[in-house]
Image (cartoon, rainbow, N blue to C red):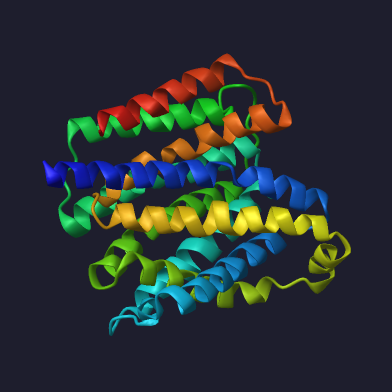
């Protein structure tokens, strides 16, 4: 019974992480309206995450800074490959393809995680897992508006979108290896220390000056960094330490559903039948993996 309760708590952590990632658009829209580009937002997010985690853990738990020998390569994977490269591919895909196509290519990630987990750790590919995967992929397609109109695509854009999905999927793979040697706090901290350092190549000082001219944007930065970056990664890593990587990636697919609901609640975006149907599909997939 205790093990079952622990597994349920881990699944709830992953669902909560997906939900907090889903509201990232609230902060991003305000920051972009204030003059920051998506590239600068990536820099602020990663450096901010590293700064907040370092400051808090320096006071609360300095042991989190101690990584086990041989772990740095996994943090390079979670930080540079799975956060920085994923974001760059995703934003680049959005520039040359329709947003709907970019979104659905990104959510090929759970299928990639399921396949890689089967190869690396012999995680079983069960009928229940395949059904949940199909439902969440269909749900994401509906929520992202794939069936609402024409999709625009280029060959290079499709490769970028698939690259984004692949790099996004690799977080669950590198994270699983890192968590085998280190506690979730250490994994989250070092992921953002590496990602923050790697993001410095994206530095655009003239855009960051907007934060000085508009100090009210600092509240949006705080929401982005604490609510939609630090907290969800802490929750996801805690859940990933006890849940199969394939299942974890599928459970996190609640993110686009929450993103759509946030757009409806905060920005007055229309609630369509496709969004409602997509939400039902994703939640059904999550329920199957309960």
Residue 74, compared with residue 85, is above or below; it is below
Position above or below: 134 against 224: above
Q: Is residue 117 above or below residue 56?
A: above
In percent of width and height, residue 93 lies at 62, 50
Question: Which image quadrant is residue 189 in?
Answer: bottom left
In the depicted view, which residue is nearer to us: 226 or 193?
226
Residue 203 at what x, y percent from top left? 72, 73
Residue 119 or 212: which is nearer the viewer?
A: 212
**Residue 38 visible, this angle:** no
Q: Is residue 40 left or right of residue 190?
A: right
Q: Quadrant of the C terminus?
A: top left
* Residue 114 falls left or right of residue 269: left
Which of the 4 image quarters holds residue 198?
Answer: bottom right
> Can see residue 196?
yes
| Residue 217 percent coordinates (x, y) | 78, 56
In depth, the one of 204 and 236 nearer the eye is: 236
- 104 and 277: which is toward the camera: 277
Instruction: In the displayed orientation, state which residue is furthest to the top.
Output: 273
Residue at image point 17% right, 36% down: 126
């Amino acid at each position: 019974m205790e093990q079952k309760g622990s597994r349920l708590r881990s699944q709830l952590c992953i669902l909560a992480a997906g939900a907090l990632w889903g509201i990232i658009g609230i902060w991003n829209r305000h920051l972009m309206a204030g003059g920051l580009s998506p590239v600068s937002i990536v820099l602020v997010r990663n450096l901010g995450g590293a700064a907040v985690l370092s400051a808090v853990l320096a006071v609360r738990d300095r042991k989190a800074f101690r990584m086990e020998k041989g772990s740095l390569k996994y943090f390079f994977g979670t930080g540079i490959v799975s956060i920085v490269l994923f974001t760059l591919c995703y934003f680049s895909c959005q520039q040359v393809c329709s947003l709907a196509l970019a979104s659905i290519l990104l959510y090929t990630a759970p299928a990639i995680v399921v396949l890689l987990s089967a190869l690396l750790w012999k995680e079983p590919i069960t009928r229940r897992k395949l059904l949940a995967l199909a439902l969440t992929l269909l749900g994401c397609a509906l929520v992202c508006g794939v069936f609402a109109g024409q999709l625009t695509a280029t060959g290079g854009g499709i490769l970028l979108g698939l690259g984004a999905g692949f790099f996004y999927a690799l977080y669950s793979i590198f994270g699983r290896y890192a968590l085998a040697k280190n506690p979730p706090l250490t994994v989250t901290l070092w992921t953002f220390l590496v990602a923050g350092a790697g993001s410095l190549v994206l530095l655009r000082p003239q855009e960051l000056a907007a934060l000085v001219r508009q100090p009210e944007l600092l509240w949006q930065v705080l929401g982005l960094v604490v609510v939609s970056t630090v907290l969800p990664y802490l929750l996801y890593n805690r859940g990933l330490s006890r849940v199969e990587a394939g299942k974890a990636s599928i459970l996190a697919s609640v993110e686009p559903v929450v993103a759509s609901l946030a757009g409806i609640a905060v920005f007055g975006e229309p609630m369509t039948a496709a969004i409602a149907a997509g939400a039902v599909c994703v939640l059904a997939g999550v329920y199957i993996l309960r």
